Each structure stands twice: as structure tokens, then as C-alpha cells.
């Protein structure tokens, strides 16, 4: 007989499959079409999305392979086996800091954006605070419950996005998409880089794989999960270019939002598609934030084993809040996002790659 | 006990954060702007031009059934507010000092700019900036140019619609009935043309002078992208030709003479295909083929349409007429004004991207490669049906 599946604080492979797209679909989805359109001609940007996505899938594989070599071990545990204890402590602390900054960025971003589109006169401090309260509440509870939340939210987010995409179909002009392949290699390279940066998020597997009851399956689940945002981003990008043309997309701050505003249900009885759209991007930012917050708690908890989780959550929350309030305007926020991108290359690409090479080279396996 | 008190405190604290009281706007304080009209302010200032912006704001009391309140029958369903200033945002803020309802632009449907303003270089672009930049605005707002005063358009009394803007919007959407009405131009599309610095034809709204004043949309204004200003107005025939060449005709009528009497051909479907032949900068050719399908809607001439020879006679005549309209338009735009509002540029870009990148600065300005290109017109007409009767008189 099957016992209650989630009572043991372990997760299956489908949970990992859900958590990856849930993390990846975040702030980047709103501006990515613009970033791509800036560097490429007409609709050539789909190529860099696939290229960047390909690299993302590759490193998802690397991270998952690495973590699944050491089943039911925390990142600190297996990295200390690989690179000595002191260094492992430093690594874990750095990664914890990275995820904390990332969480604070998301929390600030949600405030900036909803202030711009929804609540013009509500102070951003309050918006961030309210959002952080909800995030903290989620993180303070059971970790496995968070995975259930992803399973609940992701279909809604993807479903609404698909509806928006479907309704843009009649508005797409073929003229906007042609001519094909006129971008120079520099444009492709730049596009690939920006796509890769906005796909950062598979690093969470370094920590979450340890929770799995069948860690071997993390590899496949993670890679499938990574493919979901890639396909979604390509479709969204093509829709933005097809409806609004390359040059307009390149000149809109958040093209995805504008796309939702252009869409109208035929017959005119429902015009304001963006209302639903706002709801789902707050949900998307929420699912991203809770993962980043949770991972930082997890990482720090592995260093200070004796501290209770709830205490850590309550200590980290104000720190994240204050960090989120530091940037003074949108330009500085964009700088933070850029910095996070490069830090992400370290955390999600370089560190796992080095660790797995070490593990292979020295033939270390956690499962004997 | 202590627990219960802390719960109560928590619940009341959450009231503070969950009600969102910072941004609440009562619906009766919100002035829903339906249309905007921009004129040149009569006070000529030194340097930058100053504008007069008129908003048409709904007064919901006048819209209702009329029996809700005793006096509401006399209340107009809308009111126009005008304010002056040198930037749109400035003007909107000035307006706040005049109206009881703060303008809310989320439901704006129409922007009308007077041709006087559009003729000033850069003014058109500068005005549209706020309508694109502000997050309340939608990219589906329709753009029109007024031949005379833009404010006047918002003031006429519509016999059918309660709001002048609703009346104008429904005219603009009548593209299925008239060749001269192109599908409405949205501000999002205009944004695209402004960004790439290309020319565009913008529907023109005029107030008919005879009898009761009422708005008409049957011509187009030519906006020249490189010099950022409106340069001319097309006649009704030229507008028809333009729509035919661009393939934007959705329906309409063509009248031809057969045996000295009128026969009306109704276009049910029309399309145009433009094929560029590019051999070099100075040797660009466009073959435009206009194809229409339709039926005989009205015939003064006494002809038996069961005879294929007669039908093809009509087809030939219609083809001639379509060709004439297209030629008239080309004479004006290609030879006279030398402005490419047909979007031929797009076909060059699609066909030869390298060449396009080298000539795009000189397309319809400077060296004007557009005027050096050759454009040939072909027409093809099919009569699908001749109507319900064979003849109405012996």
C-alpha cells in the first residue's frame, strides 16, 4: 500500500520537471523579445533562443548529472567530498548569496512593474513588502508544499500564455517576419547570450536533486522541464515580431505586455486581456521568488545545521527586503539583473562543470 | 487569550496592506476619454508651436435610458474639454484644473490631429509620443488627420450614435462598403512607420460643408517619413487607387459606362500582388497586379448578361477603370510628390536586403530611388454573378 506521498519530505521526478520552467519563467519573459529584436533582423531571433536554450539544456544535464551522483546529499556534503570542506563552505555561502540577491531582485521587480502598470501611487516599498510577506509565508512552510504550488501554478501560467498567443494569430503579418537570416554573427551571438542569461535557473537542481527519492530521474525531468520555456519563448518572440514588427518590439520596454494589450477577443465583449496577463506574471514572479528564497534558506541551513528553518526564514526576509530596496531606479535595477546574469554563469555553468570534471576525474561517486 | 489578541492585531494590520487604498479612484470621479483632438493653439508662440488638446469625455448620466432621473433627458452624454500648452502632458495636467473628472485614457479610441499641426515638421511625432509612451494607452487607438479643425469633428451632433467618437469610429470601420475607406490605421502601426522613418497614408476626416455638418472619411493625407511632416492630401480618386494598389480594398463599387449608360460593378473581393524586379539601385521595377471579384450590382444599360460576350465587356471596362484609378494615383504619388506610401520599400527589403540597406536613407527622399523605379499596373476582373434579375425593362 502506498503511504502518503509527501509526508517524507521527498519529491518525485515530475516535481523537478515542474520546478524548472516555474523558475525560468520570471522577469525575463517580459523583456526578452526586445533584447532579441535589438540585435537581430526581422524574426531571426528564434535562432539564438534555440542556441541559448540548447546550452541551457546541456548544463541542466551537467548539473543534474552531478547532483544525482550523490543521492540524498546536500550540495555542501558532496562538494566537500570533491573540493575539501573549507572551500565547500565558501562555495555554498556564495551560492546562497547569489540566490538571495536574485530573490531580492525579483521582489523589487514585481514592485517596479506593478507600480508602472497598476498602482501608480502606491509606494514600491509597500508593494515589495506585501509581496515578500506572501513569499515568506510560502517558504516558511513545508518545502514539499512549494513543489505542489508549482504544479498548481505552472499550468495556469502556461495556459494563459497560450491563450494570448492563440489570439495573436490573426494579427500576425508575414511581412514582419521576412526576410529570413539577414543577421550577422555578432547579432546571433549577442542574442544567444541574452537568452542564456534569461534561462538561468537550472542551478536550483544543485540543491533540489538531493530531495528526490529517485535522483537518477532528475536528469531527464530537468531537461524536459527546460524545454518548456524554450518553446514558449520562441512562440512568444515570433508572435511579438509578427504582430508588432522587429523595430517596434525593439523599442518597447516590455513587449510581452504590449502584446497582451493589442490582443482583443473577437466581438469586442472582452477587451482587457492584459488584466489576466498581469495576474499570471505576478504568479510567475512569485513562483520564481519562492524557489530562490527557499534555496538560500536551504544553503545556509546546510552550513548552520543547528538553526531552525523558521528562524533562518525570518532572518533572511528583512535582508532580502533591504537588498531589494537598494537600486534607485530602473537603470540600476537593470544593472543588478545584468550582474545576476554573469553571477549565474558562475553558479550554474562554471561551478557545476568544474565539480563534475573533478568527480569524473577522481572517480568519486556518492552512491558507492 | 494572548493568542486571540495577537490574531486580532494581525488581522487588523493586514487590512492596512490588503486594501490597496493608495490607488483607489472612484468610478464617478474618473473621466473616461473616448477621443482626443489636437489643434494648433491660436496664440502663436515664439519657437515651439503650442497646441490645443481636446478630450471628449463621457458623461454616463446622459447615456442611460433617460427615465432614471427627471432631468437626464436633457443632459448631453459627453462633454469636450480643451486646454492649451506646448506638450501633451502639460496640457493634460492643465486640464485637471478645469474638469471635475480626471481624464483617464485607458478607453481612448481615437486621436485626431489637424492637418495644420501635421504639416509642422516633427510635430506629428512629438504629439503621438505620449499616446504611445503612457502605459494607460492602447496600441489599437485609431489615428485620423482632420482637414480643418480637429476639435470641430468632436462637436458635431450624430443622428444615430450618442457619442460623436462612436459615430466616427463606425465610419472608419466601413471599409467593406467603399473603396476609398482603407482599414483604420492604428497608432501601433503608425509607431512602426515613425520608427523606420517611412512614409504612410493616414485617413483624413473632413466635415462636409453643405447642409448639416457631418464627418466624412473618404480621402487620405500623405505623411512623408524622412521629413516628418504631412505633405499633401490625396483626392478621392487617388485614395481609391492607393487602396487598390496596396490591396486594402475590402469592398466597394466601380461605375463604368456601357453603351452610354451606367453599370455598377460591386467588388466583393480584391487583392493586389506586388512583384519587385531588382537589377540594381537604378533599375528597380515593380509589377502590380490588381485582381478583383464581384458582381453586377446595378445596370442602367439594357444588356443581356447571359451572353458571356457582354459580361466580358463589363469586365474589360472595369479593368480599364481600375487601371485608370491606379495610374492617377501613381502620377500623383510616384511622379509628383515622390513619396512612397504604398510600402514598396518593404518589397525591396524582402527581395534584396543588402541593396535595401544601402539605399534606405535615399528611398523617398534625397536621391529618391523610389521615383526612379518603374511601376507597371495590371488589372484582372471577374464578374461572378449578375444579380437576381435578367432585365428590369424591355
Image (tube, coloured by chain):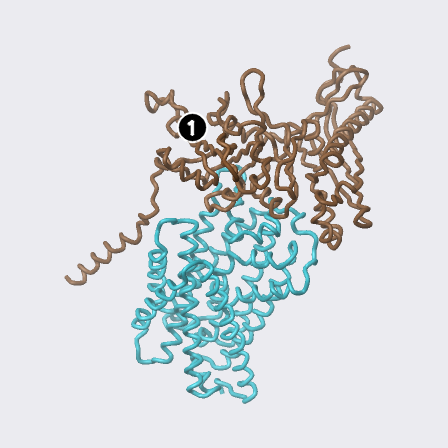
Chain colours: A cyan, B brown
Q: Give the image quarter of residue A46.
A: bottom right
Q: Residue at x 52, y 75 (%)?
A: A63
Residue B213 vs A185, above or below: the answer is: above
Q: Which of A236 and B342 is in front in this view?
A: B342
Residue B235 image offset from top left, x and y in percent:
68, 27
Farthest residue to the top: give it.
B394
Q: Which of A173 and A141 is in front in this view?
A: A173
Q: Which residue is drawn at 59% across and 39% down?
A: B121
Circle 1 crowding by C-alpha within 10 Å: few under 14, some 14–19, many from 20 = many
Residue A325 vs A311, above or below: the answer is: above
Residue A240 image offset from top left, x and y in percent:
58, 51
Q: Give the image quarter of residue A326.
A: bottom left
- Quadrant (top left/top right/bottom left/bottom right) for the N terminus of chain B: bottom left
Q: Give the image quarter of residue B366.
A: top right
Q: Name the subunit of mark 1.
A: B
Q: Is residue B37 left or right of residue A48?
A: left
- Quadrant (top left/top right/bottom left/bottom right) for the C terminus of chain B: top right
Mark 1 lies on residue: B78
Q: Is residue A341 left or right of residue B295?
A: left
Residue B13 image offset from top left, x and y in percent:
25, 55
Residue B311 image offset from top left, x and y in percent:
80, 24
| Res. B24 in view | yes
SS category of the residue bearing label 1: strand
Q: In this view, does B339 lie to the left or right of A342?
A: right
Residue A66 vs A243, above or below: the answer is: below
Amino acid at each position: 500500500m502506498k503511504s502518503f506521498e509527501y509526508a517524507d519530505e521527498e519529491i518525485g521526478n515530475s516535481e523537478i520537471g515542474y520546478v524548472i520552467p516555474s523558475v525560468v519563467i520570471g522577469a525575463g519573459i517580459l523583456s526578452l523579445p526586445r533584447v532579441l529584436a535589438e540585435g537581430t533582423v526581422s524574426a531571426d531571433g528564434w535562432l539564438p533562443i534555440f542556441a541559448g536554450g540548447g546550452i541551457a539544456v546541456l548544463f541542466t544535464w551537467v548539473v543534474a548529472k552531478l547532483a544525482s551522483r550523490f543521492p540524498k546529499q546536500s550540495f555542501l556534503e558532496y562538494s566537500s567530498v570533491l573540493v575539501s570542506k573549507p572551500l565547500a563552505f565558501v562555495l555554498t555561502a556564495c551560492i546562497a548569496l547569489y540566490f538571495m540577491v536574485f530573490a531580492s531582485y525579483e521582489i523589487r521587480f514585481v514592485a517596479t512593474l506593478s507600480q508602472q502598470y497598476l498602482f501608480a501611487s502606491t509606494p514600491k516599498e509597500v508593494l515589495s513588502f506585501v509581496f515578500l510577506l506572501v513569499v515568506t509565508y510560502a517558504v516558511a512552510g513545508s518545502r514539499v508544499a512549494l513543489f505542489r504550488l508549482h504544479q498548481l501554478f505552472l499550468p495556469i501560467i502556461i495556459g494563459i500564455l497560450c491563450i494570448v498567443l492563440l489570439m495573436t494569430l490573426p494579427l500576425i503579418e508575414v511581412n514582419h517576419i521576412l526576410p529570413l537570416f539577414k543577421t550577422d554573427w555578432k547579432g546571433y551571438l549577442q542574442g544567444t547570450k541574452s537568452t542564456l542569461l534569461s534561462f538561468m535557473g537550472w542551478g536550483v537542481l544543485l540543491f533540489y536533486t538531493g530531495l528526490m527519492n529517485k535522483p537518477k530521474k532528475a536528469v531527464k525531468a530537468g531537461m524536459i522541464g527546460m524545454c518548456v520555456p524554450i518553446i514558449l519563448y520562441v512562440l512568444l518572440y515570433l508572435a511579438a515580431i509578427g504582430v508588432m514588427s522587429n523595430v517596434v518590439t525593439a523599442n518597447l520596454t516590455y513587449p510581452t505586455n504590449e502584446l497582451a494589450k493589442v490582443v482583443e477577443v473577437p466581438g469586442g465583449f472582452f477587451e482587457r486581456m492584459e488584466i489576466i496577463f498581469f495576474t499570471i506574471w505576478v504568479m510567475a514572479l512569485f513562483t520564481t521568488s519562492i524557489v530562490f528564497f527557499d534555496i538560500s534558506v536551504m544553503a545556509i541551513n546546510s552550513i548552520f545545521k543547528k538553526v531552525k528553518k523558521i528562524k533562518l526564514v525570518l532572518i533572511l526576509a528583512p535582508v532580502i527586503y533591504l537588498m531589494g530596496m537598494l537600486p534607485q531606479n530602473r537603470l540600476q535595477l537593470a544593472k543588478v539583473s545584468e550582474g545576476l546574469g554573469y553571477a549565474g554563469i558562475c553558479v550554474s555553468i562554471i561551478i557545476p562543470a568544474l565539480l563534475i570534471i573533478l568527480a569524473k576525474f577522481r572517480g568519486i561517486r556518492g552512491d558507492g | 487569550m494572548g493568542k486571540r489578541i495577537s490574531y486580532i492585531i494581525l488581522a487588523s494590520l493586514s487590512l492596512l496592506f490588503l486594501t490597496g487604498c493608495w490607488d483607489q479612484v472612484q468610478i464617478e470621479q474618473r473621466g473616461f476619454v473616448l477621443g482626443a483632438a489636437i489643434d494648433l493653439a491660436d496664440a502663436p508662440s515664439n519657437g515651439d508651436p503650442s497646441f490645443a488638446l481636446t478630450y471628449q469625455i463621457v458623461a454616463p448620466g446622459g447615456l442611460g435610458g433617460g427615465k432614471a432621473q427627471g432631468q437626464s433627458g436633457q443632459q448631453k452624454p459627453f462633454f469636450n474639454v480643451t486646454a492649451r500648452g506646448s506638450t501633451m502632458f502639460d496640457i493634460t495636467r492643465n486640464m485637471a484644473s478645469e474638469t471635475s473628472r480626471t481624464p483617464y485614457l485607458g478607453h481612448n479610441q481615437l486621436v485626431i490631429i489637424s492637418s495644420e499641426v501635421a504639416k509642422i515638421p516633427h510635430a506629428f511625432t512629438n504629439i503621438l509620443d505620449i499616446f504611445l509612451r503612457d502605459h494607460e494607452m492602447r496600441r489599437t487607438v485609431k489615428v485620423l488627420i482632420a482637414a480643418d479643425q480637429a476639435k470641430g469633428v468632436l462637436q458635431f451632433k450624430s443622428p444615430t450614435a450618442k457619442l460623436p467618437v462612436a459615430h466616427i469610429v463606425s465610419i472608419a470601420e466601413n471599409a467593406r462598403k467603399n473603396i476609398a475607406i482603407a482599414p483604420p490605421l492604428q497608432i501601433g502601426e503608425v509607431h512602426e512607420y515613425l520608427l523606420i522613418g517611412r512614409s504612410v497614408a493616414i485617413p483624413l476626416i473632413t466635415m462636409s460643408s453643405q447642409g448639416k455638418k457631418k464627418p466624412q472619411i473618404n480621402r487620405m493625407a500623405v505623411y512623408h517619413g524622412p521629413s516628418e511632416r504631412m505633405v499633401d492630401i490625396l483626392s478621392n480618386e487617388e485614395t481609391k487607387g492607393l487602396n487598390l494598389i496596396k490591396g486594402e480594398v475590402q469592398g466597394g463599387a466601380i461605375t463604368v459606362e456601357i453603351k452610354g449608360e451606367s453599370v455598377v460593378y460591386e467588388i466583393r473581393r480584391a487583392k493586389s500582388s506586388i512583384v519587385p524586379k531588382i537589377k540594381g539601385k537604378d533599375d528597380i521595377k515593380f509589377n502590380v497586379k490588381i485582381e478583383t471579384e464581384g458582381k453586377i450590382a446595378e445596370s442602367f444599360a439594357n444588356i443581356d448578361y447571359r451572353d458571356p460576350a457582354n459580361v466580358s465587356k463589363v469586365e474589360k471596362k472595369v479593368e480599364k477603370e481600375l487601371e485608370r484609378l491606379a495610374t492617377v494615383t501613381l502620377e500623383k504619388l510616384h511622379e509628383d510628390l515622390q513619396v512612397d506610401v504604398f510600402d514598396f520599400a518593404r518589397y525591396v527589403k524582402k527581395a534584396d536586403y543588402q541593396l535595401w540597406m544601402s539605399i534606405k536613407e535615399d528611398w523617398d527622399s534625397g536621391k529618391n530611388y523610389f521615383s526612379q523605379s518603374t511601376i507597371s499596373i495590371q488589372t484582372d476582373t471577374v464578374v461572378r454573378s449578375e444579380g437576381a434579375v435578367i432585365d428590369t425593362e424591355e
